[in-house]
C-alpha cells in the first residue's frame, strides 16, 4: 500500500543572487536563483524537468535521456555511471543535477567541478512512489520554479491516488526479472518493489531487501503467477519461456509473462504508465 512518509525538508540559505542547498550526500551547494543552463545525468530527473515544461534549459543530458523528448536528441553527452569532466566543463552549465550512481569515484568525482565553480547537486534516488513527490519539489526549488513543480506534483498525486490499490484483496505472486545472466530481481525497500505492491501484486522476493540474485530453484519454489520484464530487456521473455527448469511454474505454464514500459525503472511521474500496465495485468 502507498505509505505516508515525512515530507523532505530542503535546506536553503539565501545569499544575494544565489541560494545554498544541502544535497543528498550532505554537501552545501551554492546555486544561482536564475538557472538557465542545466545538465541532467539521470533519466528520471530529466523527465521531471521536461514535464515541468523546462526542456529548453537542458543543454546536456545522459545518453538514456535523449529519447525522452525530441528537443533532447543529440544532447546525450554523458554516461550515467560517471560524470564526463571534459564535456561538462566545455558546456559550462549553471547547474548539474546528478545522483550517487554517477559518481564513479564518490565525492572525489566532484573536486574538479568545485575548483572551477560549476555547481553539482547530488539527488537521492526515490525508493517509493511517495518519494517521487519529494524529487519534484526538490527540482522545483533548485530551478526556482516552484509553481511549475507544484502543478506537476499535484497532477501526479491525483493520478497516483486513482491507481493505487487500497483494499486487501488477494494479491497475485509476482516475479520481476531485471537481468538474466545471472538473474537479478528486486526485494523490498526498492522503488520497483513499491510499484509492484501498489499495483496490487505480491513480490515473491519481498521478504528480502534490496537488489538480489536468486537461484533458479528459489523462483520455482516461490512459484510466481505472473512474471514481469522491463521493455528495455524484452529479449529475456523467450529465454524464460524456454527454461527447462521453469516449465512447471504457474506463470510459464499459463503464458503470463509480460513486458512492462521501461519507465518502471524511473522514479518520475511517468512511472504511472507502468503502474497502470501492471495493475491491468494483475486484474486479469
Image: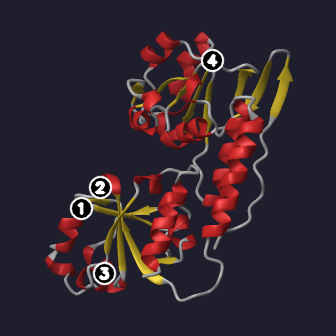
Give me the C-alpha separation between circle 1 and circle 3: 15 Å
Q: Position of residue 121 (x, y in %)?
A: 63, 30
Q: Is residue 241 left or right of residue 83?
A: left
- Front residue of this view, candidates 109 and 75: 75
> What secondary structure is marked by label 4?
loop
Residue 66 occupies quadrant: top left
Mark 1 and mark 4 residues within 8 Å of each other at the beta carbon: no
Dot placed on the residue nearer the N-terminal end, 3 or 4: 4
Label 2, on which residue?
233
> What secondary structure is marked by label 3?
helix
Dot placed on the residue nearer the N-terminal end, 3 or 2: 2
Q: Position of residue 153 (x, y in %)?
A: 70, 49
Dot placed on the residue nearer the N-terminal end, 2 or 4: 4
Asked if residue 284 can be seen in this view, the reply is yes
Instruction: Please tell me how crowded label 4 is: few (under 14), some (14-19), or many (20+) other residues with Cα within 10 Å.
Output: some
Label 1, on which residue?
236
Give me the C-alpha separation between circle 1 and circle 2: 6 Å
> What secondary structure is marked by label 1?
helix
Amino acid at each position: 500500500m502507498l505509505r505516508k512518509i515525512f515530507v523532505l525538508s530542503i535546506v536553503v540559505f539565501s545569499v544575494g543572487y544565489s541560494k545554498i542547498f544541502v544535497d543528498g550526500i550532505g554537501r552545501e551547494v551554492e546555486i544561482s536563483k536564475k538557472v538557465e543552463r542545466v545538465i541532467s545525468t539521470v533519466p528520471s530527473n530529466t523527465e521531471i524537468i521536461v514535464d515541468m515544461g523546462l526542456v529548453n534549459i537542458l543543454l546536456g543530458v545522459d545518453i538514456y535521456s535523449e529519447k525522452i523528448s525530441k528537443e533532447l536528441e543529440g544532447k546525450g553527452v554523458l554516461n550515467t555511471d560517471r560524470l564526463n569532466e571534459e564535456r561538462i566543463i566545455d558546456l559550462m552549465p549553471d547547474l548539474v543535477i546528478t545522483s550517487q550512481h554517477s559518481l564513479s569515484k564518490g565525492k572525489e568525482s566532484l573536486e574538479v567541478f568545485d575548483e572551477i565553480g560549476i555547481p553539482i547537486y547530488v539527488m537521492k534516488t526515490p525508493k517509493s512512489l511517495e518519494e517521487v513527490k519529494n524529487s519534484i519539489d526538490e527540482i522545483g526549488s533548485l530551478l526556482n520554479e516552484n509553481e511549475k513543480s507544484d502543478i506537476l506534483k499535484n497532477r501526479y498525486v491525483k493520478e497516483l491516488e486513482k491507481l493505487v490499490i487500497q483494499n486487501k484483496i488477494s494479491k497475485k505472486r509476482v516475479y520481476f526479472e531485471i537481468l538474466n545472466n545471472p538473474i537479478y530481481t528486486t526485494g523490498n525497500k526498492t522503488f520497483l518493489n513499491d510499484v509492484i505492491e501498489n499495483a496490487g501484486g505480491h513480490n515473491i522476493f519481498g521478504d528480502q531487501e534490496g537488489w538480489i540474485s536468486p537461484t533458479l530453484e528459489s523462483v520455482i519454489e516461490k512459484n510466481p503467477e505472473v512474471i514481469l520484464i522491463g521493455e528495455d530487456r524484452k529479449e529475456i521473455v523467450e529465454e524464460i519461456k524456454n527454461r527447462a527448469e521453469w516449465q512447471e511454474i504457474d506463470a510459464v505454464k499459463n503464458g503470463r509473462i509480460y513486458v512492462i514500459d521501461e519507465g518502471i525503472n524511473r522514479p518520475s511521474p511517468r512511472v504511472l504508465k507502468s503502474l497502470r500496465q501492471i495493475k491491468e495485468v494483475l486484474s486479469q
